[in-house]
Amino acid sequence: FFSDVRNLKKLSPPFPVMEIGFDDPHIEEGAEFEVRLRFGVTTYTLATNITRVNPDGSFEDTFRGGPFRRWHHSHRFLATEAGTLVVDELEFESAWWFAPLARAMVHLMFLYRRRVLPEVIR
């Protein structure tokens, strides 16, 4: 599920509207794609790069552009007795003008993902 960039949209809240541009939807080291976030009439484009893919399926990505000056996101998957635990670790810095909203937006995005992930992967 996580090795296909098209599934990112399934895990994203309805606002901001997310569009993804890619040549190849597979998550592999060095892969690049664009994420466009539409906030009404304003659209921000983030150049996304998959910087590392590990044999266990975990991977890391970075963003360039848009309202984030720095974005480093690692995705890990841990086997448990109940199934798989998805662990996201994120470090980011937003542009000064976006800072008041950035932390809340990112927090709400991951709350949304946590809620919909079990439904989406069934």
Image (cartoon, helix red, strand yellow):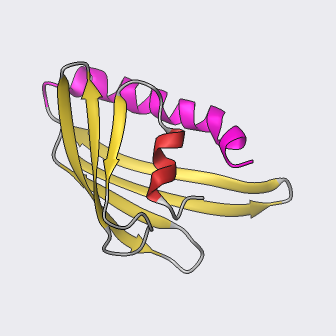
Residue 56 x %, y %: 60, 75
Given residues 3 and 76, the one toward you in this image is 3
Q: Is residue 75 above or below residue 31?
A: above
Q: Is residue 121 above or below residue 22?
A: above
Q: Is residue 118 left or right of residue 102?
A: right
Q: Is residue 61 left or right of residue 98?
A: right
Q: What residue span does the magenta drawing correspond to?
A: 96-122
Magenta segment main secondary structure: helix
Which quarter of the figure has residue 26? bottom left
Given residues 21 and 51, the one toward you in this image is 21
- Determine if the magenta segment contains residue 105: yes
Number of marks in picture: 0
> Which residue is depicted at the point 52% across and 50% down?
7
> Which residue is depicted at the point 38% across and 27% down?
105
Given residues 69 and 35, the one toward you in this image is 35
- Determine if the magenta segment contains residue 10: no
Residue placed farthest to the right in the image?
81
- The answer, for residue 69, to whether it is visible in the render is no
Q: Quadrant of the N terminus?
A: bottom right
> Which residue is depicted at the point 17% across and 24% down?
42
Q: Is residue 21 above or below residue 44?
A: below
Residue placed farthest to the front in the image?
23
Which quarter of the figure has residue 23? bottom left
- The answer, for residue 20, to whether it is visible in the render is yes
Q: Is residue 52 left or right of residue 45?
A: right
Residue placed farthest to the bottom in the image?
55
Residue 8 x %, y %: 47, 48
Residue 88 x %, y %: 51, 50
Residue 47 x %, y %: 22, 54
